[in-house]
Image: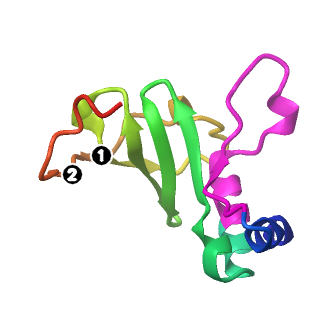
Amino acid sequence: LAELLRKLSFIGAVPYYIFQCRPALGNKAYTVPIEQGYEIVEQAKARVSGLAKRARYAMSHSTGKIEIVGKTEDFVCFKYHRAAKDEDSGRFLTFRCNPNARWLDDYDQPLDSSPIELPYSTSGTR
């Protein structure tokens, strides 16, 4: 993955998103759990520099585009980038780790769900 990020950046195709595989009939064999995917992406980004580090690990969920922003031993954190509901824009979600989760819906209720107070409304910008 690091080599791919490096080569894409070198040819001017700056990587922006690396998407978690959407659950669909027949593709489970090609997916990795979210937390494992996060580790893979972070390890790859640690081996590159400059614009190649820009890639964000995200998923296109029915509620919006959500970035997987961090993981500790006990928790995994997500942030809405584009949300279906205006009140979710910029919202952070914290869940207890689930090493088998392959999609946001595989996590239990969020332990924390913090909205970001924006100085503007994102209504009408979609």
Q: CA distance from mark 1 to mark 2?
A: 6 Å
Which picture quadrant has residue 2?
Answer: bottom right
Which picture quadrant has residue 126?
Answer: top left
Residue 21 falls inside the magenta stretch: yes
Crowd class of label 1 (few under 14; some 14 to 19; many from 20; radius 10 Å)? some
Horizontal side, residue 27 vs residue 95: left or right? right
Where's the N terminus, which quadrant?
A: bottom right
In the picture of the structure, the residue carrying the numbered disc 1 is 91
Give the total of numbered labels.
2
Crowd class of label 2 (few under 14; some 14 to 19; many from 20; radius 10 Å)? some
Residue 14 falls inside the magenta stretch: yes
**Whole-percent x, y for residue 28 in the image:** 81, 30
What segment is highlighted magenta in the picture?
Answer: 13-41
Residue type, label 2: Ile
The image's colouring method is rainbow
Residue located at (21% from left, 51% from top): 116
Which dot marks residue 78?
none
Residue type, label 1: Arg
**Depth check, front residue: 122 or 42:** 122
- In this view, which residue lies farthest toward the front? 12
Q: Answer whether labels 1 and 2 touch (C-beta < 8 Å).
A: yes
**Whole-percent x, y for residue 68 in the image:** 52, 53
Q: Earlier in the sequence, mark 1 or mark 2?
A: 1
For numbered disc 2, what is the local secondary structure?
Answer: loop
**Whole-percent x, y for residue 23 in the image:** 69, 26
Horizontal side, residue 57 vs residue 8: left or right? left
Residue located at (80% from left, 68% from top): 11
**Depth check, front residue: 57 or 123:** 123
In the picture of the structure, the residue carrying the numbered disc 2 is 116
